[in-house]
Amino acid sequence: MANKLLIGALSLGRGSNLQSIIDHIKSGKISAKIGCVISDNKDAFALERAQREGIPAYYIYPGTHKTFLDPECEKEYVECLKRHNVELVCLAGFMRILKKQFLEAYRGRIMNIHPALLPSFPGLHAQKQAWEYGVKVAGATVHFVDEGVDTGPIIIQRAVPVHEDDTPDTLAERILKVEHQIYPIAIQLFAEGRLKIDGRRVIIKGIDSVSEYKLE
Ligand code: GRF
């Protein structure tokens, strides 16, 4: 049997996407294993979720900057992932921009989930941005990570209708449910070796319409 894809997850807090990945692995829908979970927040519930599952979980000091990891801290993040033989890094609510040494160590092997239909509404509070703008269709995106903020090649997107009585919070809740569906799909497609980055485009082998794709 082929070795399972080893994932490293980075999360700042709540970790509901991490939980969804864990659940999909447990039910056999994703053929992967989580090698480690890292947080830049000591109190992240994501760390507790990992520990409950017996997954190595680490708080690693991020440094003094708010929006990225200090270089020596970034080195520690990469070393930890390498120590656990991580092949795919999944950002799941990790709010820092990754810099050169991280991107070079895992070029084309870092994914992020964003609660909007990119390239609309990158950055923080995307659901609120979309609601305030007045869009009628919101959504979620999983993309590969590059040096920008939510700018990397898109793997999968799914639309979420905006209801007339939505608030930013109710919209965010509905988007989150979709996030929990599409992140596992992106990971499984990666695990199956179906994703090829071609410039801005991600070519998905053997699947016609990824936005309607379901995991068996
Ligand atoms: C999600 O909305 C994700 O799209 C964004 O941060 C949030 C993290 O939530 N990047 P959780 O920690 O996975 O519950």
Image (cartoon, rainbow, N blue to C red):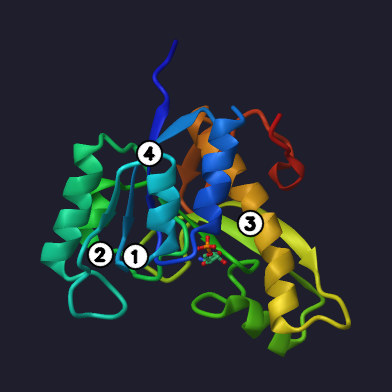
Q: Look at discs 1 and 4 and give the one toward the viewer.
A: 4
Disc number for residue 179 = 3
Secondary structure at badge 2 equals loop
Q: Mark 1 or mark 4: which comes first in sequence?
A: 4
- Tag 1–tag 4 contact (CB < 8 Å): no
Residue furthest to the right in view is: 164
Please state which amino acid type lies under the numbered disc 4: Gly
For marks 2 and 3, give the CA distance. 25 Å
Q: Look at discs 1 and 3 and give the one toward the viewer.
A: 3
Q: Look at discs 4 and 3 and give the one toward the viewer.
A: 4
Residue placed at 63% from the left, 52% from the top? Answer: 180
Relative to 5, is 56 on the left or the right? Answer: left
Q: Mark 2 or mark 1: which comes first in sequence?
A: 2
Q: Mark 1 or mark 3: which comes first in sequence?
A: 1
- Tag 2–tag 1 contact (CB < 8 Å): yes
Above or below, 28 against 138 in this view is above
Q: Would you name the residue on which mark 4 appears?
A: 54
Query: Image quadrant for the C terminus?
Result: top right
Mark 2 C-beta to ligand 1 under 8 Å: no
For marks 1 and 4, give the CA distance. 32 Å
Circle 3 residues within 10 Å: few <14, some 14–19, many ≥20: many
Residue furthest to the left in view is: 72
Q: Would you name the residue on which mark 1 appears?
A: 147
Residue placed at 70% from the left, 56% from the top? Answer: 178
Relative to 110, is 58 on the left or the right? Answer: left
Q: Look at discs 2 and 4 and give the one toward the viewer.
A: 4
Secondary structure at badge 3 equals helix
